[in-house]
Image (tube, rainbow, N blue to C red):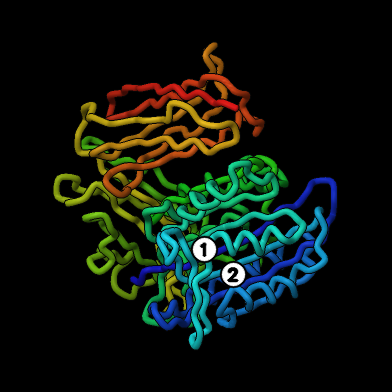
């Protein structure tokens, strides 16, 4: 297992009423002077995302690829000029950058590393957004990187009045790493967990799994909710004023996964319900493997992962629907969180077909947890909600006005995730259930928490001010 410090930037927005031109610039850096190479994963991300874009029903004008050639902001400016020059307000601009990312750089802020293996330069948030916002068009930024959530923090400072045409989705919080798998230098299958889930959500492997309501549109909000469940090794984060109305492309399913139609039972395991149940479907005889990785001392213990074969060593599982159970001895686990992954092998290369974060709750009584919201915040700002707990919990967060009317159902039945100092941040964009900005006033943010069969709740109050 290798650390994936990559940044993935993807800009995508399609207006409902206008068939505008869509342009794409896909860029990756994989060889560096100061950091280890990123291997085949960055090129794998490029290939999969390009395939998903080109196989969608959305008109794509041109797709430009720069793989390992961008070594400076000037080189990036030239590539953007080639791809985006002459864009209009109705155009869709897609920009993808894969490289090393850092939470703090030379200017005490997050940074990206541009390199062609010969020259190397830091790219700051200010420089990146200056380049992007110099072009007309609708933009979404998807950052797949270690600490990529820090770029949202930087953008919040740069744009107190958030641009309505800009949305940012990250693969990790500001204090988290992001990951990829590269099995013994595999040639074709290496990619980030986040990029793989993104492509599955868009429908590259069949049905668009992120399209929760099954209509003809896949919103950015639906994708963020899908990624929270299906990227288990890190926590995605979304910043947007229009996530309800930003539409991602739905791919035509050119590829297929060896194991598909994955579904599972609750991922919160308790002392009286310690069994994880899951099912999937195989089209052909397939070699299957499950990997369980513990979260210990603030990181995933990849080197000590437990490998389980579905049918035994080198024995193929026959086609058809399969139902499986995994029982975890909570008292012997030595961790509160397990990463479960299902791999299928094709041509001796592992293909990640599904993953889940399993939370192990040994106690069946209410435990102490802390829940904090800021006292006041300016209208249009992102609202951080701080949750600290010593053991895994299931929680629901709802926003009400002072008359008791429900304004927004933020999260429902969500299982907590491993985090720095056992502190998790949830962010409210200040929008109501229909995506409209909430007016100035006082709002109640309520959290309902479940410990086994016991439940408790707390509320905090925030004033949204001009």
Q: Secondary structure at mark 1?
A: helix
Which residue is denoted by mark 1 in the rendering? Answer: 196
How far across and how far down the image is residue 283, in percent? 53, 64
First in sequence: mark 2 vs mark 1: 2
Residue 321 seen in the figure = no
Asked whether the residues under the numbered discs 2 and 1 touch, taking CB atoms below 8 Å apart as contact, a structural biologist would say: yes
Q: Residue furthest left?
A: 332
Q: Which residue is mark 2?
A: 48
Q: Quadrant of the N terminus?
A: bottom left
Assess disc 1: are there few (<14), some (14-19) or many (≥20) residues with their C-alpha within 10 Å of its C-alpha.
many
Q: Measured from the top left, where is residue 253 in percent x and y?
A: 65, 62
**Can see residue 272?**
yes
The quadrant in which the C terminus is found is top right
In this image, 232 relative to 435: left or right? left
Q: From this viewpoint, which residue is outermost toward the bottom?
A: 118
Residue nearer the viewer, 251 or 439: 439
Which quadrant of the figure has residue 231? Answer: bottom left
User: What residue sits 50% from the left and 23% below the top?
Assistant: 463
As rendered, which of 300 and 147 lies closer to the eye?
Answer: 147
């Amino acid at each position: 297992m290798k650390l994936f410090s990559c940044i993935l930037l993807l800009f995508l927005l399609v207006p409902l009423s206008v068939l505008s031109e869509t342009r794409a610039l896909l860029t990756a850096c994989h060889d560096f002077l100061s950091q280890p190479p990123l291997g085949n994963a960055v090129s794998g991300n490029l290939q999969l995302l390009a395939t998903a874009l080109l196989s969608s029903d959305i008109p794509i004008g041109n797709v430009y690829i720069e793989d390992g050639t961008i070594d400076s902001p000037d080189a990036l400016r030239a590539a953007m000029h080639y791809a985006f020059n002459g864009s209009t307000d109705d155009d869709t601009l897609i920009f993808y950058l894969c490289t090393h990312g850092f939470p703090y750089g030379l200017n005490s802020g997050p940074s990206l590393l541009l390199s062609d293996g010969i020259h190397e330069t830091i790219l700051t948030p200010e420089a990146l957004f200056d380049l992007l916002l110099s072009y007309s068009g609708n933009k979404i930024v998807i950052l797949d990187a270690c600490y990529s959530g820090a770029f949202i923090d930087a953008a919040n400072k740069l744009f107190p009045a958030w641009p309505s045409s800009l949305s940012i989705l990250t693969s990790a919080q500001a204090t988290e790493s992001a990951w990829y798998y590269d099995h013994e230098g595999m040639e074709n299958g290496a990619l980030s967990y986040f990029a793989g889930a993104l492509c599955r959500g868009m429908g590259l492997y069949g049905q668009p799994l992120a399209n929760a309501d099954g209509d003809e549109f896949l919103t950015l909000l639906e994708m963020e909710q899908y990624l929270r469940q299906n990227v288990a090794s890190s926590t995605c984060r979304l910043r947007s004023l229009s996530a309800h109305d930003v539409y991602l492309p739905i791919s035509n399913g050119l590829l297929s996964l060896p194991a598909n139609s994955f579904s599972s039972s609750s991922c919160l395991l308790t002392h009286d319900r310690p069994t994880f149940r899951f099912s999937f479907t195989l089209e052909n005889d397939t070699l299957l493997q499950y990997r369980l990785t513990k979260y210990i001392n603030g990181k995933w213990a990849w080197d000590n992962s437990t490998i389980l074969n579905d049918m035994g060593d080198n024995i193929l599982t026959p086609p058809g629907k399969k139902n499986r159970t995994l029982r975890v001895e909570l008292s012997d686990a030595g961790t509160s969180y397990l990463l479960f992954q299902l791999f299928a092998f094709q041509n001796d290369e592992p293909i990640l077909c599904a993953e889940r974060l399993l939370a192990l709750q040994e106690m069946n009584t209410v435990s102490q947890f802390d829940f904090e919201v800021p006292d006041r915040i300016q209208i249009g700002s992102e609202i951080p909600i701080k949750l600290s707990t010593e053991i895994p919990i299931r929680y629901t967060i709802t926003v009400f006005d002072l008359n008791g009317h429900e304004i927004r159902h933020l999260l429902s039945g969500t299982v907590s995730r491993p985090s720095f100092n056992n502190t998790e941040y949830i962010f409210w964009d200040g929008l109501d259930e229909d995506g409209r900005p909430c007016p100035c006033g006082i709002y109640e943010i309520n959290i309902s928490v479940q410990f086994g069969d016991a439940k408790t709740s707390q509320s905090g109050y925030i004033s949204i001010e001009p």
